[in-house]
Amino acid sequence: AQSVTQLGSHVSVSEGALVLLRCNYSSSVPPYLFWYVQYPNQGLQLLLKYTSAATLVKGINGFEAEFKKSETSFHLTKPSAHMSDAAEYFCAVSLSSNTGKLIFGQGTTLQVKP
Amino acid sequence: NAGVTQTPKFRILKIGQSMTLQCAQDMNHNYMYWYRQDPGMGLKLIYYSVGAGITDKGEVPNGYNVSRSTTEDFPLRLELAAPSQTSVYFCASSYKDRAEQYFGPGTRLTVT
C-alpha cells in the first residue's frame, strides 16, 4: 500500500535561509512522486514531479527534490527562501491502480520571516 | 486553455438545503476528482471518475453525489447540507494514470 508522511506541519525559516521540507513515502511499486504548493485562497499548483528518470528533480521557483530509494524519501529544498515562498506544501505519491489517484501528505506550512 | 474551472467561488447554505458545485476542464482529461480540504487535515478524496459515465467513491463520499455525462464536466451534488460539510472543495483532473493532477481554484462552502 502507498502512503506519504510529511515531517513537520509547520516550518519557519528566515528570508535567505535554506528551505528543507521533508517527505517520506511507502510504496509497493516504483513510486511516482509529486510536490504541490498552495498559496492562500488558491488551488494546488504542481512544483515538480519524479517519474523514475533523474533522481534530482528541478521544479519551478528554484525548488528541487531528490529521490532517495534507500531512505524512501523525497525531500523538497530551496537554497534561499523568499518571502513569496510562504505557502502550504503537499507531497503526494501515485497509486498504481488505473484510477489516477494520488495519496497526499498532510501538508507543511512554510513561514518565511524577514 | 482555461484549465480546471469551478463555480461558484463562495457559497453559504442553510442546513438541509441542496446545491451543485460545478467543475469543468478543457484539457480532454479522462480522470477527474473531487476533494475537500479542512484546516490541518490535508485533502480528502470524495469521488473520482476515470471517464464519462464512470464514477466511484473516494475516502469520504457520504452526503455527496456525482455524475459524469461528458468528458469535460464533473459536478458534485450536496443533498441535505450539514454543518460538517463546511469546507473548501477542489476539483482536479489528470490525463493518465500516475500523472500529475491539475487543480481548480476551489469553492469555499459554509453551511449554517
Image (spheres, rainbow, N blue to C red):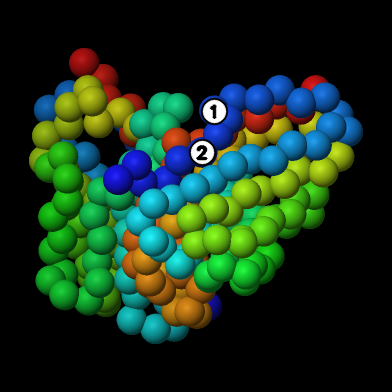
Q: Which residue is mark 2?
A: B6
Judge whether B96 appears above or below B4 on screen: below
Residue B96, above or below A83: below
What's the mark number on residue A3?
none
Q: Which mark is residue B9?
A: 1
Mark 2 is on which residue type? Gln
Residues B51 and A67: in front is B51
- Under circle 2, the secondary element is strand
Residue A105 location in percent, x, y?
46, 54
Q: Position of residue B83 (x, y in %)?
A: 80, 32
Q: Is residue B8 visible?
A: yes
Amino acid type, callout 1 = Lys
Q: Is residue A19 left or right of residue A92?
A: left
Assess whether mark 2 and mark 1 are in contact (beta carbons under 8 angstroms).
Answer: yes
Residue A67 or residue B112, whichever sits in front: B112
For disc 2, the chain is B
Viewer-closest of A89 and B1: B1
Q: Is residue A109 in view?
A: no
Apparent side of residue B102 relative to residue B24 in the rendered image (left or right): left
Q: Are marks 1 and 2 on the same chain?
A: yes
Which residue is the extreme one toward the bottom?
A29
| Residue drawn at 53 percent across, 70 percent down | B51
Classify B65 as above or below A82: below
- Residue extending furthest front? B70
* Residue A94, quarter of picture: bottom left
